[in-house]
Amino acid sequence: MPAYLNALGLICALGHDKQTVADALFAGDTSGMRMQEGWVTGRSLTVGAVTAELPAMPAGLEQAHSRNNQLLLAAALQIETPIRAAIARYGADRVGLVLGTSTSGIDEASQSIARYVHEGALPAHYRYAEQEMVAPARFLGDWLGLLGPHYSISTACTSSARALLSALRLLTQGYCDAVICGGVDSLCRLTLNGFSALEAVAAERCNPFSANRHGINIGEGAALFLMTKEPMSKEPSGAAIALLGGGASSDAHHISAPHPEGLGAQQAMRKALNAAGLQAEDIDYLNLHGTATRHNDAMESLAVQALFPAGVPCSSSKPLTGHTLGAAGALEAAFCWLSLSEYNPYNLLPPHLWDAEPDPELPALQLVQRDTRMARARGRRLMSNSFAFGGSNISLILGEEMGEVTGDAP
């Protein structure tokens, strides 16, 4: 059963709303990726930081303050009207919330702990709860007054893609009539130093699938969808945007490295196709995980070639946003949503930005060039991949459905 993605709020290095993000995405605008100091001692790194002013915590929820929750609130405010309408229609006990994150409020917590180390006392505002992984879901659920199930998922870089699959299950199993789902992660020194210790971070803008790739850039952002069983709004084409299916696998090959042949990645993509009732040739575009690390790009190339021997237009969006970790799955699903929406009137595909020097050891992929349009204007099907430490793999398929709109569009 498809689940309808009726509304989208997002913020990332590309912009602070759907229109600015879409304009930058389809133009291949990398201006949001900037070199910064201070994250890792002795290094300047390119990061995908959000520069927009973030909203203050709502009255009564000031103790929930963290940059992570501010990013989440910025995305939620963009779709507050349809969310409130869904709550009014279905009841607060029938609306769920599932979020993916990997940082939560750990940046603020680490600053407080550093103060304790140096001064012997924690600051008065420190609260352990701000660094719990459930903190974003608790904050947003409290702000919205939700009484349905609400929780966070933390499976590294598949967290928010898994949140969308979990939301789909809440709908199909009858626990909810609507689910707010997505992900959020903020830049923090712990994350950047951790990836730096793994020698996985590039100083320059990342270069996926190139012979000259040197690793990832880290970014931050949030993306939220309102998912329902029935469409509550449609695009001007008369179609509604839906999550048609998803697949998950766990190859458990290594604590951080993926299976070298991409077996788990292939399994997740095949499961997604089966869940959506589609064949590989039905996919019009694939958003690659594309981290620009040597192991990920190698295995993903093999997996994509095995599943799409005739090729499929594909690109990695990480040179535009950085790797937003726990938010990446939802954010890149959001890029697919934008590709299908009225914010993409020319039917463009997100371009793949790199130095165009392919790695001769990797299978060649059909990487999207600037100003490339989708072959079909109707009935489009887009896939998005997310892969994580421990062999956690998720593949999602979004597409256009002609379901009947129920009630007033929120």
Image: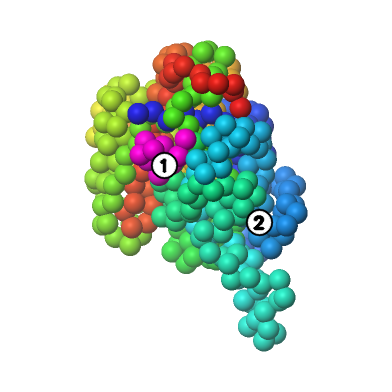
Type of residue at label 1? Answer: Tyr
In the rendering, at what x and y percent does residue 260 appear?
A: 26, 50
On the question of residue 296 being in view, the answer is no
Residue 67 shows which numbered tag?
2
Vertical placement of 312 versus 128: above or below? above
Which residue lies at the image location 24% right of the left edge and 45% below the top edge?
263
Q: Observer-nearest residue: 322 or 66?
A: 66
Residue 219: mark in rendering: none
Q: Where residue 95 appears, x then y in whole percent?
A: 52, 41
Mark 1–mark 2 distance (CA, rounded to whole Å): 31 Å
Quadrant position of the N terminus in the picture? top left
Most foreground residue, 113 or 408: 408
Q: Which region is colored magenta?
A: 165-177
The reply, left or right, for residue 302 in relation to residue 74 is left
* Residue 308: percent from left, percent from top: 28, 29
Residue 167 falls inside the magenta stretch: yes
* Amino acid type, mark 2: Arg
Residue under pointer 1: 175
Q: Earlier in the sequence, mark 1 or mark 2?
A: 2
Q: Nearer the viewer, residue 239 or 10?
A: 239
Residue 175, compared with residue 295, is above or below; it is above
Q: Residues within 10 Å of mark 1 (few under 14, many from 20)?
A: some
